[in-house]
Image (cartoon, helix red, strand yellow):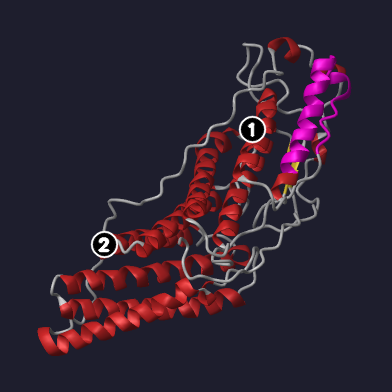
Amino acid sequence: MTHWFHRNPLKATAPVSFNLYGVASSPAANKICNDLRTTRARLLDMFTDATCTPEIMKKSSDEYFALLQGFILPLDGTTQESKLRFIQNFKWTDTLQGNIASAQQDAVFELVSMAFNVAIWYTKIASRLSGKENITEDEAKDVHKSLKIAAGIFKTLKETHIPRLITPAEKGRDLEPRVIDTYIVQSQAEAQEVTIARAIELKHNASLIAALSFETANFYQKADHTLNTLDPECSSKWKKYLQLKQHFYMAYAHCYHGQTLLANDKCGEAIRSLQEAEKFYSRAEALCKEYRQTKGPGSTAKPSEQLFFKKLGTFIKNTLEKCQRENGFIYFHKVPAEAPALELKASYGLAEPTPFELPPLSAQCTPEVYATFDLTKGPKEDKAKAKHDEEIKPVKEPDLKPQKDTGCVVS
């Protein structure tokens, strides 16, 4: 299902040389600096390499983070942080703020910014995989796994690493709570979409599908509300996507809840539940149009053009007609004025973020080598340069070419 998911752009960054001149006063120290430069450049290349796999991304990011931790962790046993933490300046754009970079002279800022981009990459590889024609069960599992990995990275950054920053994130920037919380919840919700598609494909119990759909709709609503106080100029398009997905899965929840009610001989309530599904589906269709017309960062998804979207409209219509026929011949139940409450709780299939752990410190970063970094022999990069007014070219991302839509996430 190409173009099923909305994706904000990758973060862009200025090149970093790690040229510490006289500070790195031994061959081993110089090698660490050279390896930092090359592993960083290689990792950045992987973000835009269409052939990059999750295994390659894991290897590339681990190689860089293992070395970068030498600029963060204490290696002399006397301090709470590396003496090298504040020696290098780093500049990064934000996914919602265009090409204007934030800059901090702090290796922790580099760690969280790069890891954030790794998480964004996992959401994009999930989107790319889901767009393949005749996606296999293993590929669907990879989509699900990638989205849970992304959620886990975002969550760990928020809880563990971002609080260590000396300079807190500005409003609307990627590292501030509202933005990163939305990424966490969206990644979980999209992972659950894969579960729902799988449950529908295998004709699982209607009550399970209804409960999963309801939980997923609530996730999307939570993500939408998290962005309420953000500048509409950068968040409106994203919010429209979250709203259309919320209404789409509320339609699913009411539709399958209606099936459950019918199976329990509650035909009047089933009809009312399906009428509610029609309302939510119609609103989702309208929101798709509003989303396409709203300007803002990111690629434009086209959910209303997907068979998975269209099938639901047909399914609701046919199921409602069936219930109305049954009621006219068998049940003669009164249709309630209020829709049946969705007091549904999924016992299975909820997507939990996969815990994210940094790799061990590189074997190159020993206390002996650390001692040969002499801060007295070279000036730190001028902090006055660390401004928020430098434009950085956006990342040129590989194009997503639409493929034939088979109408489901798994086959």
Residue 138 numbered mark, or none:
none
Q: How many marks?
A: 2
Task: Give the structural element (helix, strand or loop) at label 1.
Answer: helix
Nearer the observer, 209 or 296: 209
- In the rendered image, which quarter contains the N terminus? bottom right
Quadrant containing the C terminus in the rendered view: bottom left
Q: Residue 403 is drawn in which quadrant?
A: bottom right
Magenta region's main secondary structure? helix
- Residue 44 is left or right of residue 208, and the answer is right
Residue placed most toward the observer, 329 or 192? 329
Q: Position of residue 281 (x, y in %)?
A: 40, 77
Residue at mark 2 to residue at mark 1: CA–CA distance: 42 Å
Task: Give the percent coordinates (x, y) of residue 360.
Answer: 60, 24
Badge 1: residue crowd in 10 Å (few <14, some 14–19, many ≥20) = many
In the rendered image, is residue 169 in sight?
A: no
Q: Which residues are magenta?
A: 16-44
Q: Eyeballing the image, is 200 above or below 163?
A: below
Mark 2 or 1: in front is 2
User: Is residue 392 at least partly visible in the picture?
Assistant: yes
| Label whose residue precedes the other's in the sequence (2 or 1) | 1
Residue 244 sits inside the magenta stretch? no
Identify the disc placed on residue 62.
Answer: 1
- Secondary structure, mark 2, is loop
- Above/below status of 346 relative to 150: below
Q: Amino acid at mark 2?
A: Asn
